Image: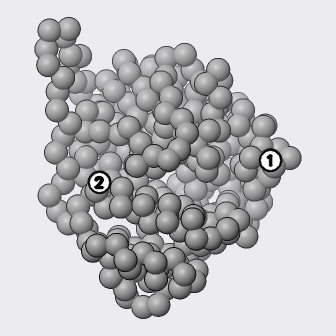
Amino acid sequence: MRVYVSADMEGITGLVDADDVQPGGRDYERGRSMMAEDVNAAVRGALAAGAREILVNDAHGPMRNLRPEDLHPRARLVRGKPKQMIMLEGLTGEYDAMVCVGYHARAGAPGVLSHSFMGHEIEDIWLDGRPVGEIGLAHATAAALGVPVVALTGDDVACAEMTEWDPSVAAVPVKYAHDRFAAELRPAAEARTAIEAAVAAALVPLPPRPAPSACSAPSAPSAPSAAEATLTVRWQSTTVPTTLLGLPGVTAENGRTIRATGRLPSLYRQFGVWMRVAASLTGQAPYC
């Protein structure tokens, strides 16, 4: 069994503030250690379920938060940026399942450190008219590749968002939001035990794929979904959308809202280009 882990930071056990998750923050180094412990709990769960290969993608901010020496030795790590597939870099249809660790609620939701990809700069996102954040867009992209999301960890608001999107996903709350920068924290040891158990239980029902032999040719990734989707993004100002209208296929809904139609995961990759353009045009702090 091959398992892919996408690891964000805002939904990690014990973390509630920008100082916990941003380089230079007074508690960032502690936050990195907490992130590694949550990820390692998920890795242990995957191994208990029989995983033979685990790939972890550091999907938060600078994407250099996980220290390689802190990661479980059975897992491989994708680290650094830019990444064409941002939070899903390295995911292909050859994986049996995806686990989301440390995810957070979308922009406007009352969850801890809630936002959608770019903090203040992105106000809202819709996928085929349905409000979506990082959770829903990751789930939809993985589904287009034929990879099921089987478990997610984060605060209770993020877990509810995942359950609303797909009730079959095992959602593990590691804290309970009181406000955007405050939460009741689940004890760390209890949270990691819950993560490990949930991931193991979610993966056990999956039929394992045969391991490739040394003589066989590599298997081709599953073909992306043929269905087209429309991604709509409302930005904080007109600066970014006006610039993005210069890209083929991008149209305006109004002065601050643009859309594009295409097939996932290509549409997700295009959204990553939008964000890189936005980053070059703005200097917004993620949680302003």
Image side of residue 273 versus residue 110, left or right? left
In what element is the residue under mark 1?
loop
Crowding around mark 1 (Cα neighbors within 10 Å: few <14, some 14 to 19, many 20+) is few
Q: Which mark is residue 144?
A: none
Which residue in the rendered view is the most extreme toward the top?
214
Task: Tell me the quarter of the picture where residue 286 sits.
Answer: bottom right
Image side of residue 190 versus residue 233, left or right? right
Which residue is the site of mark 2?
A: 265
Task: Tell me the quarter of the picture where residue 195 sits.
Answer: top right
Name the residue located 37 percent from the left edge and 77 percent from the top edge.
246
In this view, the mark in front (2 or 1): 1
Q: Image height check: is 258 above or below 219?
A: below
Alpha carbon of mark 2 to alpha carbon of mark 1: how far? 33 Å
| Most foreground residue, 19 or 152 | 19
Q: Image height check: is 19 above or below 133?
A: above
Task: Tell me the quarter of the picture where residue 18 sits.
Answer: bottom right
| Most foreground residue, 5 or 247 | 247
Name the residue located 31 percent from the left edge and 24 percent from the top edge.
1
Q: Quadrant of the C terminus?
A: bottom right
Name the residue located 55 percent from the left edge and 39 percent from the top edge.
80
> What amino acid is at disc 2?
Pro
In what element is the residue under mark 2?
loop
> What amino acid is at disc 1?
Gly
Residue 146: x percent and y percent? Answer: 23, 44
Which residue is the site of mark 1?
A: 24
